[in-house]
Amino acid sequence: MTVADIRHRVAGGIGESTHRPDGDPKVRGNFAYASDLTADGMLWGATLRSPHARARITHLDVSPALAIPGVAAALTQEDVPGKPTFGLEHADQPVLADGETRYWGEPVAIVAADSMLTARRAIAAIVVEYEELEPLIDPEEAERTGSLIRHVKVRRGDPAAHGSVVVEGYYETGTQDQAPLGPEAGFALPDGDGGLDLYVTSQWVHADHEQIVASLGVEPHEVRSHPAGIGGAFGSREDMSLHIHVCLLALRTGRPVKIVYDRAESFTGHVHRHPARMWYRHEAEPDGTLVRVDAKILLDGGAYASTTAAVIGNAAYFAVGPYKVDNVTVDGIGVRTNNPPCGAMRGFGAVQACFAHESQMDKLAAELGMDPLALRRHNAMEPGDPMPTTGQIVETSLPTKELIDTLASIPLPPENDSDDPRHLPGGTGLTTPRAAVQRGVGYGLSIKNLAFSEGFDDYAEARVVLTEVGAEVHTAAIEVGQGLVTVCQQIARTALGISHVAVLFDDTSAIGSAGSTSASRQTQMTGNAVLEAALDVRRAVLDAHNGDDLTDDGVWRDGAVVATLAQVCADGPIEKLVRFRHPPTFEADENGQGTLHADFALAAHRAVVDVDPELGLVRVVRVDTAQDVGKALNPQSIMGQIEGGILQGVGLAIMEELVIDRGVIRNANFTDYLLPTFLDAPDVEAVLIEEPSAWGPFGAKGVGEPPTISSTPAVVAAIRDAVGRDLYRAPVRPQDIIGLSD
Amino acid sequence: MSIEITVNGEQRRLEYAGPESLLTALRDELGLPGSKNACEQGECGSCSVILDGELVCSCLVMAADCAGSTVVTVEGLAAEGELHRVQQALIDAGGVQCGFCTPGFAVAAAALFDLDPVPTSDEIREELSGNICRCTGYGAILRALEALAVGEFDR
């Protein structure tokens, strides 16, 4: 049975902008987020954190906390019964500080008490004495002293090949925070039998589960990790935060325990986007043909490994962008310091590299006297071309030139002749004469992998169940807001021919892993598992009744219903479980060469900005885009990913940065960490380019990350165009625009 | 102290109104978790409620100051179960993703349309600039409310 065998078209299937099934409870305020869960007798947990970037704990006494009425438990590292460390790729992070704290905000002790206020008082009562140690805060010093997490080397082509036109550049990106609106929250409910049920903000409950049971020292079946209502993620929930803590407190007290971080704690309690320092050299022929690219990318991983090894891999392997070039060297270096740990954020290493390679392409275009889009088009990769870094032959769709041409065809906005402060940089704060405001236009082009890479055994399980009232999709894939719940429903409808489909999120005991909601992978991975399971169900039902079609009415044969759904399910529901794997990938050889990636997606962005050159303020007027989506399964959802992703890219371009001073985050709140508001949001015109992926369901590609990747360099390029300065750093600060930081 | 407060048309009693915010009282004592705690600084608007006719961030209001007040939360927008038109418009236009900001947007948008049934796009952006959304980039929220302003979603 293939998709082509499905003849009738069911309402609410793929290609339609169907509405989210969770939209109604969300607008009513009825949707249960992890932070909303509660139970009789519930305790509140709280976390004591290190006030130093690096320190030795010389004395730790929780007894004053335990003496406070209402405090049920106060735990330290000594109370972790199992494995004392955890980590997504390398288990190097202590569950609670192991005698030395290695970053500001590292958890030292946890308490549970009968109210949030009591829990906070208990934290304050814990006696802890530190001997401060000199923190390692400079990533270049970390590189010099060998404090490496991973060094990725790419050596491709002829070291002696050179071009006659050379541009060099140094670039930086700051530490961006995912800042999902929903802070970290976890709720652990003991089962009275030594185990518990955990409801927690997560992107991958099965990976959590493996680490949790190891640290708790219990059998896997004793803990059930449930997908819970989540207020956004963007990578911040791929690593665990309070997961083990809330379980430890629940098992110790035998009572339900909830931990909810406040905003300040959220900023310290999850990993951030790696800050980057990047050195680039591009060489080209006078006609613009790229001859070689040399790059060094240094990412500060902070105190613990998290996903730094994979992030620096991505930065290195996407260091050049979607351009044909035969001679490439890249050194991607991820270092360990005493800065806050960094890990996954939307774009995952490709964001930093894209800022540098696109800045270089503009610099090269200027050096050559070429139009920046024409230079990109001249060098654009096409299907069947090797990746400039890994040499992998790209076998999926790769409509690079179509993206460029489509973007160029979107009309530019008219000149800004408005005197309304809402249309001007700085709004009512604008003091510059209206005529001094400068307009600029800039471009960005990006490529990124979809799903997991470098030989990882990447799979997703889904179960489709046909009952007499319709179909159920069961998955442990995490809906973080992106719309997986909608797309699974649409895929199942189209594949089964049944319109009534419910998507149910199972815990770790009820279904196998769906893999992480990251790497833009769930539409392809869980989507394919749902598609195959649904087709299996359909085939089984049609075979059993010798039918030729399936609808809400039942099985059809020769234009008549021969069995209703009730009759089909008379002996019980029909169910099929599928574990989907994408085409295999492999680890790179010693030169960084090989088939490392499963699929690729492109995006192109054009930003238009108005800049106040005296105060250094920017208004992003619009960001237009063409995106390589494979097949648009839900255009409205894709638009939501595109506009939301672009705004996060705009944030990194002009306003979002954690200010970290000797390892200490100085702006861990929404007053000082600036998130784009409604008034900062540009208008967006997006064109979806549909050329089918080699293996995505119905040809779909993941769409979540590309909008965030090349929007940042496009905005910065537009600011450069407006003010004529060589801006090397994102976010661009007012002092950079007016020249005070030269 | 013990106070009386009218929430979504119901007379409610807070037995121990101490130093906590109205947001905490709503969520943890009155069983109304629809208002969200996302910053506790009045920056993000996720906790927006209508207090005696005024749109406020409930995280910035002391519960004890609300004695005798009337509060409408997101749970009170849908009269007799039927969605308020701003709620329906947000669903229809794709203005909901993770949904954590949605209760605040729904309340703030309802307050805006009560004051001005036909706001311009610039007015929508400005009036809702106190509500932060991290998912949508605001485009779908704007389209939802623009459509409402021209009567497209009226029912």
Image: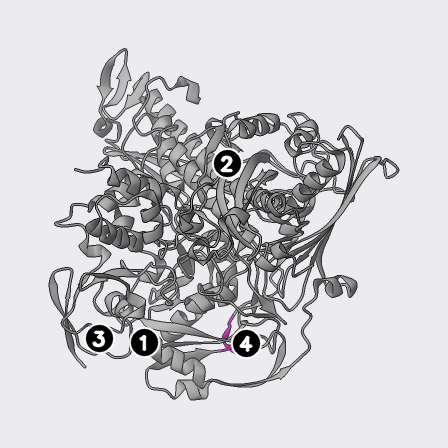
Between marks 4 and 2, how big is the CA–CA gap? 44 Å
Which quadrant does the C terminus of chain A fall into?
A: bottom right
Q: How is the image coloured?
A: one colour
Q: Mark 1 — residue?
A: A115
Q: Check disc 2 and report its element: helix, strand or loop.
A: strand
Name above or below for residue A343 compared with residue A402.
below
The residue sitting at 19% across, 38% down in the picture is B154
Q: Mark 2 — residue?
A: A624
Q: Check disc 1 and report its element: helix, strand or loop.
A: loop
Upstream in the sequence, badge 1 or badge 4? 4
The residue sitting at 67% across, 79% down in the picture is A133
Q: Amino acid at mark 2?
A: Asp
Name above or below for residue A663 compared with residue A419.
below
Name above or below for residue A588 compared with residue A312.
above
Give the mark count.
4
Give A78 or A374, whichever is nearer the viewer: A374
Upstream in the sequence, badge 4 or badge 2? 4
Q: Mark 4 — residue?
A: A50
Between marks 1 and 4, how big is the CA–CA gap? 23 Å
Upstream in the sequence, badge 1 or badge 2? 1
Q: Amino acid at mark 4?
A: Ser
Can residue A20 be seen in this snapshot? no
Location of residue B22 (image quadrant): bottom left
What is the chain identity of the residue bearing mark 1? A
Between marks 4 and 3, how big is the CA–CA gap? 36 Å
Looking at the picture, how far across and down is residue B3, in whole percent?
A: 16, 76
Q: Amino acid at mark 3?
A: Asp
Between marks 2 and 3, how big is the CA–CA gap? 48 Å
Horizontal side of residue A615 vs A538, given as left or right: right
What is the chain identity of the residue bearing mark 2? A
